Image (spheres, coloured by chain):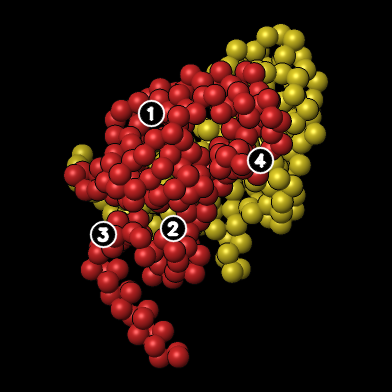
Chain colours: A yellow, B red
Amino acid sequence: MHPFRAYISEYTSLADQDWKLIADCLESCSYPKGTTLLLEGKICRKLYFLEQGLLRYCVNRDGKDVTKYFTEPPYCFTSQRSFSQMLPAQESIVALEDSYVWEMSREDAFRLLEVSPSWNTFVRQLIQEVQHYTELILDDLQNYTAEERYIRMMQERDSLLGKVPLKHLASYLGIAPQSLSRIRKRFYEQGRNLT
Amino acid sequence: MHPFRAYISEYTSLADQDWKLIADCLESCSYPKGTTLLLEGKICRKLYFLEQGLLRYCVNRDGKDVTKYFTEPPYCFTSQRSFSQMLPAQESIVALEDSYVWEMSREDAFRLLEVSPSWNTFVRQLIQEVQHYTELILDDLQNYTAEERYIRMMQERDSLLGKVPLKHLASYLGIAPQSLSRIRKRFYEQGRNLT
């Protein structure tokens, strides 16, 4: 099964004819590590499905590169506000690893809303899911220190940590790279003491 | 015009017959100040439209009452994940002032998705809007200190500050009430020096 079909099917039932309509709108693209898929300030005119690779959402804050999220496959993504309202994107999306992506134009994504109830349900549930993840990150920030959040990432997204450069991880946690180095050192020393 | 019709019309065009379908599902309710509309852990089975009043989303974190958001009218709200997936709500919703609300059952809200394209478009755009606001709060937390965030609230949501008890405002900003008192004192002293 196509990985995007499998992904949609986790949200809603998808008849063959609905999948055909969707598949006809997809284009496959490869982005080598370091490529900028979307540049902050530009209008995002595509809906993407990440099949392989790793992405970073980031913003330029007074000349400083700040990481907002990391996106791992399988995941359907875009710059939501820019995509839905044709506004300049408030973030860049950059490939942290060689990434393999399926793309759909904005026009097709909106046209499908009119003709496919399954697509309509999928899109609504997807936005809800994104909203839920954003709330979880917010909850983390409101309730835990950078050190606690790093430990939670170790526990829940361990595979991610090995792939992300320290500087991006530090900016995601809202701390200086030096502070993250200290936290990591302390964590590993405590870990050794426990064994 | 009914305030909920006016609110929906800001998101999408709404024909008379679509509004009639929606209006038939609405029930008006009054919640005196201090009423809990939704209790954390219960399933949220209603979609609400706040016409008048003020609400607080909050969670019990290790016995501590933490404020997540304040909701001002006009606003359409629910506990999204609980409402859409019938899961226990991860927050309580409490009236901070006497509040006047229109309510729709979960069954009606989902049934309308099938029969009214306007309702469908409204719901999708509403979830996107909530997602955007959540991102803005996240962005604030990632990039500004509690003092900076308080000053931004003074500038952008001044009318709210006079209505919200200090302890809830402090927990929303993620600081102790005493720290907020110091920030306010410093802010007013600086204000006086500027005049």
| Label of residue B172 in the image | none
Q: CA distance from mark 2 to mark 1?
A: 27 Å
Relative placement, left or right, of A177 versus B116 is: left
Disc 3 target residue? B167
Q: Nearer the viewer, mark 2 or mark 4?
A: 4
Which residue does the numbered mark 2 point to in the structure image? B141
**Residue nearest the observer in this picture, B25 or B184:** B25
- Answer few, some or many: residues within 10 Å of disc 2's Cα (few below 14, many 20 plus, some between 14 and 19): some
- Work out whether mark 4 precedes mark 1 in sequence or the reverse, and give the earlier one: 4
In the rendered structure, the residue with mark 2 lies on which chain?
A: B
Q: Nearer the viewer, mark 2 or mark 1?
A: 1
Whole-angstrom CA distance, mark 4 to mark 1, is 25 Å
Let me know if residue A75 appears in the view. no
B78 vs B183: above or below: above
Q: Is residue B11 left or right of residue A103?
A: left
Look at the picture and state if A2 lies above or below B103: above
* Badge 3 amino acid: Lys
- The quadrant of the picture occupied by the C terminus of chain A is top left
Q: CA distance from mark 1 to mark 3?
A: 26 Å
Gap in angstroms between the C-alphas marked 2 and 4? 32 Å
> For the residue marked with disc 4, what is the amino acid?
Ser
Residue found at x 71% / y 45%: A85
Q: Is residue B141 left or right of residue B168?
A: right
Q: Which residue is mark 4?
A: B9
